[in-house]
Image (cartoon, helix red, strand yellow):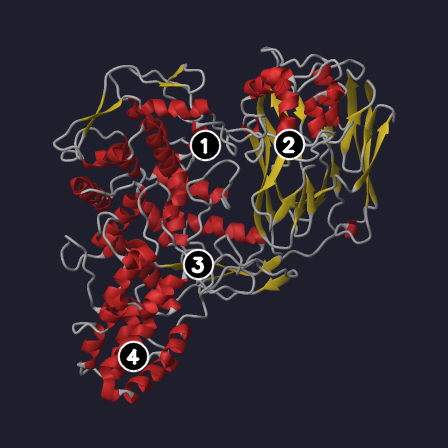
Amino acid sequence: MHKTLLLGFAMYLGSSWISGPVRPVAAATAETVRLEFNTPHTAPPQPPVTSPPAPELEVPPGLHLVGRDARWQLQLTLNARSEDGQVQQRDATRAVTYQVVPPHLASVDDTGYVIPLASGAGELVATWTNPQSDAVESSGAETLSASLPIHVTGVEETQPVNFPNQVTPIFTKYGCNGGGCHGKAAGQAGFKLSLLGFEPREDYEHLVHESRGRRVFPAVPARSLLLQKATNESPHGGGQRIQIDSPEYRILQRWIGSGMPYGSDADPVVTHVEMLPTERRLERGESQQLAVLAHYSDGSIEDITRTALFESNNSELAQVDQRGLVQLGQNPGDVAIMARYQGQVAVFRASIPLGVTIETWPTPINLVDSFVFDKLKTLGIPPSQACDDSTFIRRVTLDLCGRLPTAAESLAYLESSDPNKVESLVERLLASTAHAEFFAKKWSAILRNRHDTPGQQFAAYAFHDWLRSSFQDNKPYDQLVRDILTATGSMETNPAVAWLSEVTTAEARVEDAAQLFLGQRLQCANCHHHPFEKWSQTDYFQMVAFFSKVTRKEGPTPEQPRFVSRVGGASAPHPKTGAPLPPVGLDAEPEPIAELDDPRENLVDWMVAHDNPYFARALVNRYWKHFFAVGMVEPEDDMRVTNPPSNPELLDALAESFASSGYDLKALMRLICTSNTYRRSSDANEHNLGDHSYARYYPKRLSAEVLLDAVDEVLLTHTSYAGMPVGTRAVSLPDTSFNSYFLDVFGQPDSATACECERSQETTLAQSLHLLNSKEIQSKLSDDAGLAANYANSSDGVARNVEQLYLSAFSRRPTAVELQTAVQYLENKSDQLRQAYEDLVWAVLNSKEFVFNH
């Protein structure tokens, strides 16, 4: 085929819009943007400008430091109030001067770090001076002062050192018990610590009693191998971790010198940690000092800012040092800073606005728009224009049904003047068989529906058909989950038991169920405390106990077993203590379960309860990502506290709406697809190219099955699948066992795990070459019953055929330039018209506009 000239044409088609949400926005100065929307909403007139009230310096109510080891990180805020009462908060911790009265009581450095010097009571005074360049200079305030009482006790007394509370956190802070050092499974250089210090009793045994106690020397603590290695006085593979005479060194030295006490069972333990502030709106380039407090079981509070371990979830937006100072970059967005201490975590969230003033906004249609547009206003990011009708019908048909709209469907929608045509279209698509098939395919993959032997085929096909029927009937999501998790019987009587057959152990069932239906990845907690969450081995095996009574029995064939719930108590042994653990939900209280009851029913009762904090949010986030390409939480099934959502208010509102609807999946999708947010164009404006807050629609490559079906739909061809009827669509295949290089190269999942990440949406060179030059595509193009042959024998005229091609592939008519270029090419090849049509269709298939949903 003569495709050289057409290659440029293929690259031209749709090339103006294809950009994903990955490129950072360039730094921009504050400005005003006026956007013209189909339904503009003009901001109300602004009142006359008046002088804002004087700023205020906010300080803690007071400090009480107990013992010589006590420390406190101050966190001061400058509150500047506008004339309308809005408060602009700035961190002033490092912008003030400090004075302690009397001065011998305590010292405060310029970072606001307080160290006790002597017992007594006094006052700490902070003074802020207005710099000439400061934004609040117009307030007229030159200096501000604020004071707080300070009370110091126990400095002269020797405080006992508690191993879990004071020693273990040092190992975590300096990486000694990390996964790349002594915290890995086999330890390092003969010395093993528990990962991140989650098992302090084990650490104590390894450190004090292992190797004949050679690591500690209480007679001369400074000669202890522990201190000599940590300071690199003795050669250490990890280099120097702490300085001699540093606070950490002195604690370790005193602990060794006092005989290495572990601590008493009556000693207080950490119940939770708190970050101050919890959230704040900050300007690009600003800094923010954080403070972290540990709350103990006896009600006491300790500042642990310099002991906690900090981490940013987006280092391009913000970086944090180990003193808790957050430094923002020049890009707008949302960022979270995690602080970890003794298995507890706390999170600080910052919103970083772009600083663009937007005078008009699209009209909110439903709750989706209210929360998305409020977020964009906070960030100062203008949304893109609304997409046109051709883009919308193609987008929503692909997202809801996994297929292209037909040329007739597209034309009818484009020519319709019905003001409710969006709602009517969404309703028709949700009721279609194609929708049920598409979502059955989606769920079949992550529910591990597959068959490796002919004997397993019946179960795989039956489970897929059961899923399809469930979605066709719009079975409530809570009932769908209950049917899967509590399934009993055989494949013939209850196809949902296929999940139990494929996921064979209680541990794997817990991990899959938590990841799929709760958005929690519990795999780490099987062996140790989760490093980024609060889940312990106890939490994990209490969940395992729910599946402890499930028993596999012989069925009609070895590949078709039966599953029953046996009579008796439900429990799972703790892997270290061997103690039996009862079934308990995550963060839930234990409830009695009768021996004749199936504990899985209790598990689902807990999961689907309206106040469950995980169930509805996990599904909402999963479906949000399906439609918008980027979840409010990424990855979509890793909804830990240290991975907060980009729009928590929207996630909570959608979860509440979903639960209140009776877990109606179609109601949720209807809400999303009819929103004004979903109707945004994928074309970025000058401010939202790097946005992740849904200021525009993010283009995504068609999935493997959808793309192969789209090729067949446009070319009027069929792909054959062994054992399936002619005309079977790829999205209708019951599992992923069918051999297809096309599906493999475009990222069809193996259905071997519960993770959506198995499905690749990346674009690769192999994919491009397959569309450009594979025998499979060439044979479809030259099919005697295919599109090119039909057009070559058609009497409709060249221009008419080009228009139909565009409607079929892009759901739009060609532009004048596109039509002229295509018609001219075809007329110049009138003696080889079929080949010319093949060239034109080939160019369309290789365009970005065809391969992506935009």
Residue at mark 1 to residue at mark 2: CA–CA distance: 21 Å
Work out which quarter of the rendered image holds the N terminus and state it: bottom left
Tell me the crowding category of disc 3: few under 14, some 14 to 19, or many 20 or more residues within 10 angstroms, Cα based. many
Identify which residue, 333 or 649, lies in the foreground. 333
Residue at mark 4 to residue at mark 1: CA–CA distance: 55 Å
Residue at mark 3 to residue at mark 4: CA–CA distance: 36 Å
Residue lying at 32% horizontally and 59% vertically, measured from the top left: 422
Residue 789 in which image quadrant: bottom left
At mark 1, the secondary structure is helix
Tell me the crowding category of disc 2: few under 14, some 14 to 19, or many 20 or more residues within 10 angstroms, Cα based. many
Q: Which mark is residue 524?
A: 1
Q: Nearer the viewer, mark 1 or mark 3?
A: 1
Sequence-wise, the earlier of marks 3 and 4 is 4
Q: Position of residue 586 (x, y in %)?
A: 42, 27
Q: Position of residue 247 (x, y in %)?
A: 75, 27
Residue lying at 38% horizontally and 76% vertically, measured from the top left: 7
Do labels 2 and 4 touch, CB within 8 Å? no
Q: Amino acid at mark 2?
A: Lys
Sequence-wise, the earlier of marks 1 and 3 is 1
Q: Horizontally, is 344 left or right of 517 in the view?
A: right
Residue at mark 1 to residue at mark 3: CA–CA distance: 35 Å
At mark 2, the secondary structure is helix
At mark 4, the secondary structure is loop
**Residue underneath mark 4:** 1
**Residue underneath mark 3:** 697
Q: Amino acid at mark 4?
A: Met
Identify which residue, 668 or 458, lies in the foreground. 458
Q: Amino acid at mark 3?
A: Tyr
In the figure, 493 relative to 334: above or below? Answer: above
